[in-house]
Image: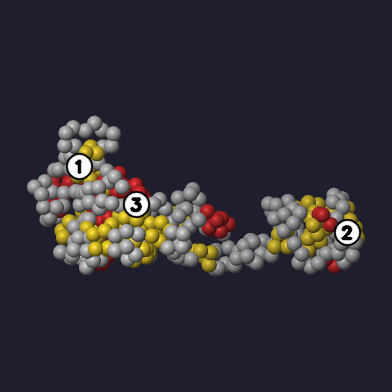
Amino acid sequence: MISHDDHLARILAAAPAPRVERLAVSGGSLLGRLLAADVRSAVELPAFTNSAMDGYAVHSADVNEPCELPVVGDIAAGDTRSLSCEPGSTWRIMTGAPMPEGADAVVPVELTDGGVERVRFEAAATPGNHIRHAGEDVRVGDLLLPRGTHVAPHHVAVLASSGVTQVDVVARPRVVVVSTGDELRAAGSELAHGQIHDSNGPMLAALVEAAGAQLVEQVHLPDDARAVSQLLERAVESADVVITTGGVSAGAFDVVKEALIDAGDVTFDKVAMQPGKPQGFGLLGERRVPVFTLPGNPMSTLVSFHVFVLPTLDAMGGRPPRECERAVVERGWTSPPGRAQFARVAVRRDDSGRLVIHPNSRQGSHHLGELAEANALALVPADVDVVQADDELDIQRLLTKE
């Protein structure tokens, strides 16, 4: 057997580098995506000098004390005329409207009598007051958003205002999920004796989405090695990752193993972990698409995804490794000797603020009853066979929707 750390290291060494794709700023598809390159401005912001207030554009030298001036006309936001303000006159101007040439201040309407043909100013004007100068916010070439930014709605405003229409982002890995087994039926189907509902397929599909990857297809196949081979040949044409579940142990109907044994660089290992000992990983097709063959027991599938698939999807999606946390055991349990155990646990903070581990009472790879209470996996090292109360363990949070 090999350790789970060695198995993961081998997988990550083979994982493809992140792909880059270009997305439009408008339309909403950019939200939450990871920028693959710095974005710099090609324009100045503001693009032109404009008024910050509703009021009157003036020569400040004309309004050094309360006085009255003739109003030449109005300048609204969006006015495209090239206008000038002669000494001894004023323009009525709206917020965001371009300043007329020669004017060096705006007097807010609140400090005037609001006149249309002539206006009385009640206070002196100060040069530069209430003016937004061209380029004072952003200059050409200024960094708008750095590489690695997860795009939020307010980032879209920055990009759109700077005239950016497309940006490069890290592509979400495209994933095909395949569950196998003659005994499986879709949820809600009527079950004959010996049949069960397929929980692995829907769970893996949900895990893929929660990991921030793109689910391309979720398929269930019978125990037919030819059908598995045909599906895999098709999947590697469109997917970046393929995940299968079931059919990788040592049984007579382990069709995934049969289909893949001569299909490329695929290795099947016994990993020193519980649950999830039978594991397979390799690269398929001309595009060298990673394929994970996970064991079929539901808890083995869940744990295997978090331990092996999730770090790979993160690496292919340009994300940093997820951090483990330390937590204190509330009550102890036993762990299989010589194998790292990934125990399903509920983690809560106690009154003192400590993270406390509450283990599920049953840790079998087929046990689903208490899974709804779990929110993390606790890693018990391979050289520990008895976990004691007050021991500290590393925990990995179970995925929730990002």
Give residue 271's mark.
none
Nearer mark to the viewer, of 1 and 2: 1
Give residue 374's mark.
3
Amino acid type assigned to the residue bearing label 2 in the image: Glu
The secondary element bearing badge 1 is classed as strand
Q: Mark 1 points at which residue?
A: 221
| Crowd band around label 2 with a 10 angstrom C-alpha radius: few (<14), some (14–19), many (20+) | some
Whether residue 396 can be seen here: no
Q: Earlier in the sequence, mark 1 or mark 2?
A: 2
Q: Residue at x 21, y 56 (%)?
A: 276
Would residue 62 appear left or right of 219 to someone viewing this image? right
**Image coords of residue 175 (percent x, y):** 30, 51
Q: Name the residue under label 2.
A: 122
Q: Distance between the residues labelled 3 and 1?
A: 29 Å
**Image coords of residue 73 (percent x, y):** 81, 52
Amino acid type assigned to the residue bearing label 3 in the image: Ala
Q: Residue at x 85, y 59 (%)?
A: 89
The secondary element bearing badge 2 is classed as loop
Nearer mark to the viewer, of 3 and 1: 3
Q: Distance between the residues labelled 1 and 2?
A: 83 Å
Would residue 225 appear left or right of 352 to someone viewing this image? left
